[in-house]
Amino acid sequence: MEAVKIAGDDLLVDIEVAPRSDIFALKGYNSWRKTLEVQIKSPPLKGKANKELIKEFSKLTDRPVEIVSGLKSRQKTLKIIRMSRKDFLDILEEFKG
């Protein structure tokens, strides 16, 4: 999965966001855009969508998360602090269940 890259001790994850969904969900990998597709409940207004992304990914990974690019775009790059690629991919598999 090319959307997940190692950056030192951290992980960079390229995502594409679909706001105003019924639930927070990881919909899968878009191989054409090389992004992880993510649905969120919040609208893209006044940073609400970005706050939800940070909150949900922090809860999912149990690690600090920040947005390193794409603050005003549907395509974003998240930085997950001190997480291995394998651990993240395992969480994705478990989340899809």
Image (tube, grey):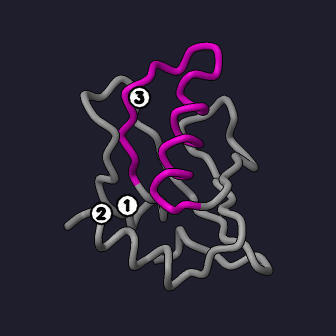
What's the residue at 41%, 63% (across, down)?
32
Q: Nearer the viewer, mark 3 or mark 2?
A: 2
| Mark in the foreground, 3 or 1 | 3
Q: Is residue 42 above or below residue 87?
A: above
Q: Position of residue 50 (x, y in %)?
A: 60, 33
Question: Which range of residues does the magenta coloring cover?
Answer: 37-62
Identify the residue under disc 3: 19
Q: Earlier in the sequence, mark 3 or mark 2?
A: 3
Q: Residues within 10 Å of mark 1 (few under 14, many from 20)?
A: some
**Amino acid identity at mark 3:** Pro
Structural distance between the alpha carbons of marks 3 and 2 = 19 Å
Residue 53 is a magenta residue: yes
Residue 91 lies, in percent from the top left, at 40, 71
Q: Is residue 26 left or right of residue 11?
A: left
Disc 2 element: helix
Please tell me whether mark 1 or mark 2 is closer to you in this view. 2
In the visual, does 63 lie left or right of 36?
A: right
Number of disc labels: 3
Which residue is labeled 2 in the image? 95
Q: Sequence order check: which comes first, mark 1 or mark 2?
A: 1
- Marking on residue 30: 1
Q: Amino acid at mark 1?
A: Asn
Q: Secondary structure at mark 1?
A: strand
Q: Check disc 2 and give the amino acid type.
A: Phe
Q: In the image shown, does 81 or 13 lie closer to the viewer?
A: 81
Determine the secondary structure under disc 3: loop
The percent position of residue 76, horizontal first and vertical second, equals 61, 46
Residue drawn 53% across the image and 28% down it: 49
